Image (cartoon, helix red, strand yellow):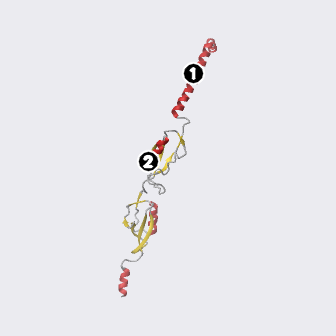
Amino acid sequence: MRDFLNFLRSRTFLIQLALAFLALILFGFLALRWLKSTTQHGDFVVVPDFSKMSVMEMREAADNSGLRYEVLDSTNYNPEYPRFSILEQNPPAGTRVKNNRKIYFTVNPSGYKKVSVPRIIQVTRRNATSMLRAVGLDVQRVTYIDELGKDMVYYIKFKGKEVNPGDKLPKTSKVELICGNGTIPGKAIIQAESKD
């Protein structure tokens, strides 16, 4: 034990300890320098605002900024943005990121997604309107014809053409409901003829 304690106090041990300490400091310094150069510590790129750019414009701007990108599909059409333009980006504009960072883009589709026309034939106008709104369609006009069922839907039209339940229309489309007015078809003519 005494020999070990004498060794710890010896000049040789202290020199070795100092050299080991210096080697550790030098290793740490070199490791930090290497990490800084590899991770580009302190080098940032400010993410541009890609909003409403076309996909081609976005690609060029991303390349010029030293950023990578990935385009994600979108099912939500926004009429305030041009078709096939950038709707959203992540990270958002103004964010400081490292060079070569990947930016994720959501692109505006060419139009509203299509929805199925619900089964509203022989349904009251009020219920039919609610069912249409539930799927994203709207009633533009109601036209009445001589049919016994008052306010009962007999036909559905879109842009003047008859559509059937299950047909696909772009979301937010406005349709025309053809409803009965409560009159039996042909009864008014028969009564008029009998009065003569």
| Residue linked to disc 1 | 23
Mark 2 or 1 closer to N-term? 1
Q: Amino acid at mark 1?
A: Ala
Q: Gap between marks 2 and 1, in whole Å?
A: 53 Å
Viewer-side label of 2, 1:
2
Residue 56 % position (x, y):
43, 47
37 relative to 139, above or below? above
| Residue linked to disc 2 | 56
Q: Residues within 10 Å of mark 1 (few under 14, many from 20)?
A: few
Outermost residue toward the bottom in this view: 196
Where is the N terminus found, in terms of image quarters? top right
Residue 102 % position (x, y):
48, 42
Q: Residues within 10 Å of mark 2 (few under 14, many from 20)?
A: few
Where is the C terminus found, in terms of image quarters? bottom left
Looking at the image, which residue is at 57% across and 27% down?
A: 29
Instruction: Name the secondary structure under disc 1.
Output: helix
Give the number of marks.
2
193 left or right, relative to 45: left
